[in-house]
Image (tube, helix red, strand yellow):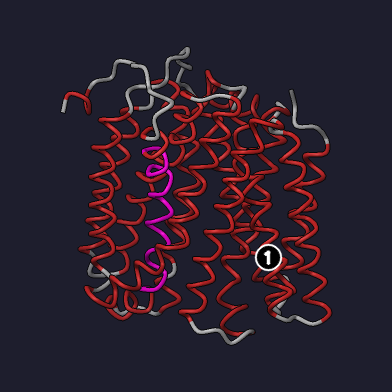
């Protein structure tokens, strides 16, 4: 218990896998709380006597709060340290999960989701800030790659887990599971990681916060790699959001086959992340990022071409695999590049990065649904535009 309440900075054994494991858990919690519900939305709607369309607001509200809340959590952690915001975030997330599990109508469910997202945004944004506190250079790139692998696994496997829980115990069991996950994770965090923010504490006032964010946006060392990673994440979110329409409606896959596709994406993105951990120590960050961006742009242009010519599955799948592999290289390395120069304000940098990623992802999801009624064509247009834009942005120079 002393480890949970001790706020004195202490040395973190960076050679041990435990710090990265705990940081991965912090990152995965927000994704787990969203994706685990996807198979249960129809049953939740029936249970709460609302339509399926109405109950999807539980996802929309969560993502909105999750994105906006990061802008507040980052500066708070730069002023007061990482430990207490993270522990409070776990407690808030736990309370929100219990509230959701006990909800008997949609308004109460939405209130619980707001509370849940408020806690999750703290753990997500601070996982990146803590990684920057204790790692740097190639070690930070390796840590971010491993964290991304776990986050991808949470995104891919949690719908299958949620479906199994829904079928066997009902949808409320999903909230019980994520609440228990938060409780165990809080203990692990308190034991493994001490206070990691040993730099100068940034003053907490609106003017200082605004100046910090404005300074980051105007600094090419942050803005260029942050925008690059956000655009590639926007491609991924567009793909995930369009997948049900594409695979089930257009290609006539079953929901189980769609779930297996999501699982497959985990392995490909993970392979890209592992490749990134090998490339960064040997070639630095810049070269692998550029190579990954070229791969994502070429594969997305191929998807667009396939959608125009034939819209057949196997060529689409091959191009998508190349994109996912390139994304697995670009995202962690560009994230590491964006955060590396800003140790004294890593919380704010991480928060702004998370906000940019969520906002660009939201734009991508909207465009993928609005550009065309043909899902593959819409996906090809959006992903090609985003990946070419990312390549163009990074070509301006990643900063020094």
Q: Nearer the viewer, residue 297 or 368?
A: 297
Helix, strand or loop: magenta stretch: helix
Report the side of 110 relative to 239 (left or right). Answer: left
Read off the magenta span.
Answer: 22-40
**The C terminus lies in which quarter of the figure?**
top right
Report the side of 300 relative to 87 (left or right). Answer: right
Residue found at the far top of this picture: 200
Q: Is residue 368 above or below residue 248?
A: above
Report the side of 371 relative to 248 (left or right). Answer: right
Residue found at the far bottom of this picture: 252
Q: Is residue 136 above or below residue 45?
A: above
The residue sitting at 25% across, 41% down in the picture is 91
The reply to whether residue 373 is in sight is no
Q: Position of residue 355 (x, y in %)?
A: 55, 43
Identify the residue under disc 1.
320
Q: Is residue 359 above or below residue 5?
A: below
Q: Position of residue 313 (x, y in %)?
A: 68, 79
**Image quarter of residue 172:** bottom left
The residue sitting at 83% across, 80% down in the picture is 309
The residue sitting at 28% across, 47% down in the picture is 182
Report the side of 45 relative to 240 (left or right). Answer: left
Q: Position of residue 88 (x, y in %)?
A: 29, 36
């Amino acid at each position: 218990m002393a480890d949970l309440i001790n706020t004195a900075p202490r040395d973190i054994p960076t050679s041990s896998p435990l710090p990265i494991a705990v940081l991965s858990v912090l990152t995965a919690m927000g994704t787990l709380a969203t994706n685990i519900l996807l198979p249960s939305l129809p049953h939740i709607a029936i249970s709460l006597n609302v339509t399926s369309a109405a109950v999807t607001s539980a996802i929309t509200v969560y993502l909105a709060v999750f994105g906006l809340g990061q802008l507040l959590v980052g500066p708070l952690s730069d002023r007061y340290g990482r430990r207490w915001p993270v522990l409070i975030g776990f407690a808030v997330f736990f309370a929100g999960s219990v509230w959701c599990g006990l909800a008997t109508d949609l308004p109460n469910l939405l209130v619980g989701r707001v509370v849940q997202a408020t806690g999750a945004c703290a753990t997500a944004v601070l996982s990146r800030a803590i990684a920057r506190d204790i790692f740097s250079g190639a070690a930070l790139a390796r840590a971010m790659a491993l964290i991304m692998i776990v986050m991808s696994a949470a995104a891919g496997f949690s719908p299958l887990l949620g479906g199994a829980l829904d079928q066997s115990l009902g949808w409320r069991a999903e909230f019980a599971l994520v609440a228990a996950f938060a409780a165990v994770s809080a203990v692990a965090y308190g034991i493994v990681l001490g206070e990691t923010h040993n730099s100068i504490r940034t003053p907490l006032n609106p003017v200082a916060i605004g100046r910090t964010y404005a300074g980051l946006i105007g600094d090419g060392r942050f803005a260029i790699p942050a925008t690059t990673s956000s655009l590639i994440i926007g491609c991924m979110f567009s793909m995930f959001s369009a997948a049900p329409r594409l695979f089930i409606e257009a290609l006539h896959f079953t929901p189980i086959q769609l779930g297996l596709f999501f699982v497959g994406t985990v392995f490909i993105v993970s392979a890209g992340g592992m490749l990134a951990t090998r490339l960064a120590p040997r070639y630095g960050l810049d070269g692998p990022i550029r190579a990954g961006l070229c791969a994502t742009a070429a594969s997305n242009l191929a998807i667009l071409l396939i959608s125009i010519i034939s819209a057949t599955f196997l060529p689409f799948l091959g191009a998508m695999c190349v994109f996912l592999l390139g994304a697995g290289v670009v995202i962690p390395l560009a994230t590491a590049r964006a955060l590396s120069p800003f140790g004294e304000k890593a919380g704010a940098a991480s928060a702004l990065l998370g906000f940019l990623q969520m906002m660009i992802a939201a734009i991508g999801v909207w465009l993928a649904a609005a550009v065309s009624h043909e899902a593959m064509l819409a996906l090809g247009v959006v992903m090609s535009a985003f990946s070419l834009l990312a390549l163009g942005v990074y070509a301006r120079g990643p900063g020094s």
